[in-house]
Image (spheres, rainbow, N blue to C red):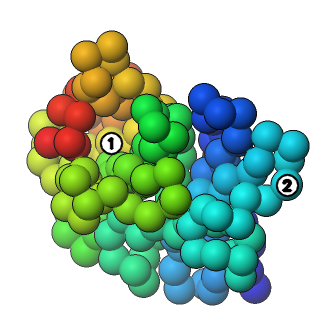
Amino acid sequence: VEKATTRAVAALADGRIVIAGTFDPSSLAQMCAIRRFKSNGDNDYDFGEGTAALGTAFVEFGDPLARNEALGVFAGAANTILVVGVAETMNSPGHRPAMARLLANGQLDPSFGVGGRQIIQNQPFGPSARTLFNSVAMAPDGKILMAGYCDDCSGGSGDDFVAVRLNPNGT
């Protein structure tokens, strides 16, 4: 059974609208789905994978047979789109914070991270911490700001706030 969930929305400078969330084509995998609409609300077929996808770009942060979920979206310069979320990996911890940058046509930006994606591999709070980012913004200097929460970051049982700043290229 296919299902889709929307988690975030952003307005581009030209009036188009972007939503981001998760598309679950089967019980085995989830992928990030980013859909763009024209300013009048119609699907924007010039974005993503073409008319068959109704103006949708699909992104896998990590393992294509695992959970890849978009939790936040930001409209960047030149109609680029920053997406933050979670990538499931086979390593501990099993969930890692991740992000991607899409070009105006919905394709991954090859100048960002590794092939348009960036998975935060080093968790500064220890191997049992689970960090998730659910919002993203851009600082005036072009650096990327991500915020979310970290479960078990301070050795306790509660969630903690967490924020990270990356360079414009995702490093």
Residue appearing at x 52%, y 59% in the figure: 105
**Crowd class of label 1 (few under 14; some 14 to 19; many from 20; radius 10 Å):** many
Q: Secondary structure at mark 1?
A: strand
Report the amino acid beneath label 1: Thr
Side (left or right) of 47 relative to 40: left
Residue appearing at x 73%, y 58% in the figure: 44
Residue appearing at x 61%, y 62% in the figure: 47
Image coordinates for residue 17, horizontal then vertical, percent: 70, 41
Image coordinates for residue 120, horizontal then vertical, percent: 22, 49
Q: Which residue is mark 2?
A: 42
Q: Secondary structure at mark 2?
A: loop
Residue appearing at x 71%, y 82% in the figure: 52
Q: Which mark is residue 131?
A: 1
Q: Is residue 1 above or below residue 41?
A: below
Q: Are marks 2 and 1 in contact (CB under 8 Å)?
A: no
Q: CA distance from mark 2 to mark 1?
A: 35 Å
Report the amino acid beneath label 2: Asp
